[in-house]
Image (cartoon, rainbow, N blue to C red):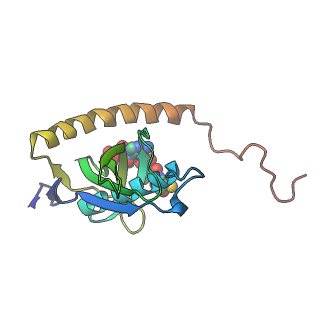
Amino acid sequence: MGFSGHSLPVRTIAESQSEMTELILPNDTNTLGNLLGGRLMHFIDLVGAMAAYRHSRTHVVTASMDHIDFIAPVHVGDLLILKSSVNRAFNTSMEVGVKIWVENTIAGMHRHVASAYLTFVAVDSQGRRVPVPRLEPESEEEKRRHEDAGRRRELRQQELQRRRESRPSDSPMMGTVRPGSK
Ligand SMILES: CC(C)(COP(=O)(O)OP(=O)(O)OC[C@H]1O[C@@H](n2cnc3c(N)ncnc32)[C@H](O)[C@@H]1OP(=O)(O)O)[C@@H](O)C(=O)NCCC(=O)NCCS
């Protein structure tokens, strides 16, 4: 681990890469015995946060999760394997890539079921945003992911700006009945 000009450490991707394995139980599934999409997103958020914590060594909040395709179902009794790594660190935010496989416990076969990109923002114990250590990509593959993360950030920012402009200003929810109202 080295140090950049502003005395924050410089970290490699390997230093924060994380992995999580979950046995899928009936409580995680729908009426067909398939893993619920929301439960999968919960696991993705957790394994993504692990990499973000290890990179930033501070508190993190999830700012966004990009588009996600559920490529194949996961069944009760399967093992879900999730791997996460920080693709790029920006100022206070980090893009984390998560890839998910399912392992059939009897056949031992692995199958890719989903991938997702998440952005985590580093905050201190008061919830104030704090700078994150720089990420040093080493291999060609890591450098490619670093470049791709920069392009995705630009698209994300354009899209965020568009949504912010079209968002109605804060107002009471439609149809909300306030205490005392008729
Ligand atoms: C995420 C959050 C900290 C951003 O705060 P903000 O005041 O809007 O901050 P800014 O617009 O100045 O952006 C701060 C950083 O976050 C990034 N960011 C903000 N919104 C983002 C989004 N929707 N997607 C990706 N990145 C985002 C910005 O690019 C910027 O990155 P940088 O510092 O590396 O350049 C704030 O919206 C928040 O606290 N959200 C709730 C988080 C939470 O509770 N998550 C759990 C899910 S309920």
Taking the spot 32% from the left edge, 53% from the top edge, the residue there is 107
Q: Could you tell whether 111 is left or right of 76 in the image?
A: left
Question: Residue 152: percent from the left, percent from the top?
Answer: 32, 35
Q: Could you tell whether 177 is left or right of 168 in the image?
A: right
Taking the spot 37% from the left edge, 47% from the top edge, the residue there is 118
The residue lying toward the viewer, choosing from 87 and 179, is 87
The residue lying toward the viewer, choosing from 102 and 114, is 102
If the image is split into quadrants, where does the N terminus sit?
Answer: bottom left
Please, which residue is most extreme toward the bottom here?
125
Taking the spot 12% from the left edge, 55% from the top edge, the residue there is 4
The residue lying toward the viewer, choosing from 4 and 2, is 2
Number of numbered discs on residues: 0
Question: Residue 5: percent from the left, percent from the top?
Answer: 12, 54
Taking the spot 43% from the left edge, 46% from the top edge, the residue there is 64
Question: Residue 86: percent from the left, percent from the top?
Answer: 25, 50
Give above or below for 45 relative to 116.
below
Give the image quarter of residue 151. Answer: top left
The residue lying toward the viewer, choosing from 155 and 123, is 155
